[in-house]
């Protein structure tokens, strides 16, 4: 059914790498990757995960080592069965890149009350911790559904 899952946020250095790593732990038989909507525009392509996101993931037994940010492309959208975005507005951004992806793009927070997961980038450590807790809760909910 959904064997190829793509997790998407804006820069692909905070939320989506954490979501990708958590889903990989919870769903080891699936192909799971991540990408960003504005990775190239932000100059983040090829960058590793954000330092604070990395620390918080590590404190929770999740490794973001080896992550390299990549730009979401039409080709990537075609390759994946399910695209999980962090905010409702990201659905439209994905569809503007690949209109055919509309039917397979859903919120990462779909099963936790269709909740947006706010971007903690350049905010307090507490903002990162809050985002991570939501990502963790949502990842577990997706693992139950898949």
Image: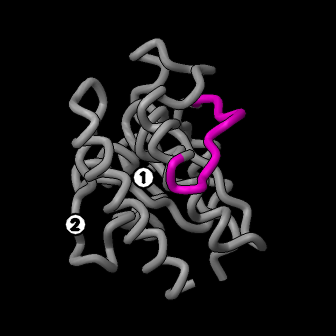
The residue at the point 48 percent across, 35 percent down is: 12
Query: In this picture, is 101 found above or below 111?
Result: above
The residue at the point 38 percent across, 71 percent down is: 137
- Residue 131: give x, y in percent of width and height: 30, 51
* In front of the other: 68 or 5: 68
Query: In this picture, is 34 found above or below 101?
Result: above
- Residue 13: give x, y in percent of width and height: 48, 32
The residue at the point 68 percent across, 36 percent down is: 65
Q: In which quarter of the image is residue 37?
A: top left
- Which region of the structure is painted magenta? 59-69
The residue at the point 40 percent across, 47 percent down is: 94
**As drawn, is 43 to the left or to the right of 62?**
left
Query: In this picture, is 89 found above or below 1?
Result: above
- Residue 64: give x, y in percent of width and height: 61, 41
Give the residue at the far front of this rendering.
59
Residue 145 colored in magenta in the image: no
Q: In which quarter of the image is residue 117?
A: bottom left
Give the residue at the far top of this rendering.
43
Give residue 99's mark.
1
Q: Nearer the viewer, mark 2 or mark 1?
A: 2
**As drawn, is 61 to the left or to the right of 18?**
right
* In front of the other: 62 or 22: 62
Q: Is mark 1 on a helix, strand or loop?
A: helix
**Distance of mark 2 from mark 1, alpha carbons?**
23 Å
Give the residue at the far right of this rendering.
29
Q: Is mark 2 on a helix, strand or loop?
A: loop
* In front of the other: 95 or 140: 140
- Residue 87: give x, y in percent of width and height: 26, 53
Residue underneath mark 2: 115
- Which mark is first along the chain, 1 or 2? 1
């Amino acid at each position: 059914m959904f064997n190829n899952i793509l997790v998407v946020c804006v820069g692909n250095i905070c939320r989506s790498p954490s979501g990708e790593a958590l889903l990989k732990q919870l769903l080891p038989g699936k192909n799971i990757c991540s990408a960003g909507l504005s990775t190239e525009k932000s100059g983040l392509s090829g960058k590793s995960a954000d330092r604070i996101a990395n620390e918080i993931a590590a404190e929770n037994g999740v490794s973001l080592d080896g992550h390299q940010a990549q730009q979401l492309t039409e080709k990537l959208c075609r390759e994946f069965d399910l695209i999980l975005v962090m905010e409702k507005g990201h659905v439209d951004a994905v569809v503007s890149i690949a209109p055919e992806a509309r039917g397979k793009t859903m919120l990462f927070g779909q099963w936790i009350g269709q909740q947006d997961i706010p971007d903690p980038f350049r905010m307090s450590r507490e903002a990162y911790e809050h985002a991570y807790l939501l990502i963790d809760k949502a990842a577990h909910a997706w693992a139950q559904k898949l």
